Amino acid sequence: MKRISRLVVGLAVLGLLSACGPSAAEQGGESDELVFAAIPSEESASLQQDFQPVLDLLAKETGKKITFQKATDYAAIIEGQRAGKIDIAKYGPFSYVLAKKQGVPANAVAGQVEAKGEQPGYRSYAITRPGSGITSLAGFRGKKVCFVDPTSTSGYLYPKAGLLQTGINPDTDVQPVFAGGHDASAIAVAKGDCDAGFAYDSMVDRQLVEKGQLQPGQLTTVWKSVVIPGDPVAISDDLDPAVKEKITAALRDKANSDYLRANGFCTGECKIGDVDGYGFAPVDDAFYNGIREVCDVTKDKQCQ
């Protein structure tokens, strides 16, 4: 099964790489095309549409065609950017740290924010159903627990740290289930497929309720993590410095609902990304040192 799993991931990566074609990084910055890649935080058929105003902004600022790639998982983005097939990538915080640890030549320049004036950050929630009898992480012992993905920051790494600090081994003291998405994890708990689980804050508080997939009060939050650095956008180091500067400035100063709406890139609420957020704010690589510290605490094999 491990061999099959590695083969499937390998094929997914190869599929993404072949679909991307030659990138600017691969051609020494001479290409008229830049590749922007992301994965959805939930089941999404409209991920490109969610980012389209930002893609259009980057096209105008750089004078280049921006090709969007929806990846199947963060492993595909890491390998794609390592191979020079992806120029701009939206990572999860943990997957960005993994990419840097594995030598991917890219650096974070902007982090996703949900509201104007916020710092890029969010929390992991531990959730269960009202009346389950679970009132804290200690109650997860012996239960069927939904995580998101082994490389998910708020759906696995921070929950693992929280469980370990409570004296619960997430590998042996619970029955772990990897749901594949934050929405899938929360819905599985609501349906009773898992006794408890984890998902990021706004998925539980707002997104699934607004979409009618959860009813208010259908889930109870029994634990909240410390603030996790927000999802970064990382630019390939191999791009032409002038192009990198234009992308960085655009993401930090203009990739937000106010600017995009005022300049005709979108209308109405103009929510950006699949978290329906405000846009992006400046970050750098050091902003993600908190993730590295959690890796030191958990000693998780994924961190290696």
Image (tube, rainbow, N blue to C red):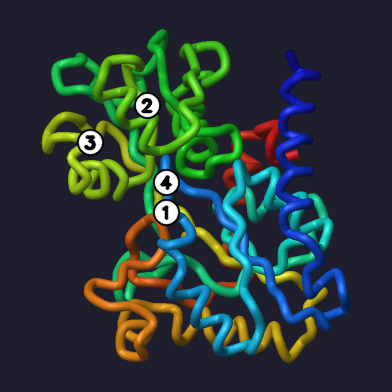
- Tell me which amino acid carries mark 4: Ser
Residue where numbered disc 3 is placed: 213
Which residue is situated farthest in the top direction here? 142
Residue 289 visible in this rendered orientation of the protein: no
Taking the image as shown, residue 24 lies to the left or right of residue 277, namely: right
Instruction: Residue under label 2, please give it.
Output: 197
Please tell me whether mark 1 or mark 2 is closer to you in this view.
1
Location of the N terminus (image quadrant): top right
Pointers 3 and 2 in contact (C-beta within 8 Å): no
Residue 219 percent across, percent down from the top left: 20, 30
Q: Secondary structure at mark 1?
A: loop
- Per the image, the residue denoted by label 4 is 44
Of 196 and 74, the residue lying toward us: 74
Q: Is residue 104 visible?
A: yes
First in sequence, mark 1 or 3: give its number: 1
**Mark 1, residue position:** 46
Q: Amino acid at mark 1?
A: Ser
- The answer for how far apart the CA atoms under marks 4 and 3 are is 14 Å
Disc number lying in front (3 or 2): 3
| Crowdedness near tag 4: few (<14), some (14–19) or many (≥20) residues, C-alpha within 10 Å | few
Q: Earlier in the sequence, mark 1 or mark 2?
A: 1
Q: Is residue 278 left or right of residue 55?
A: left
Q: Residue at x 22, y 45 (%)?
A: 211
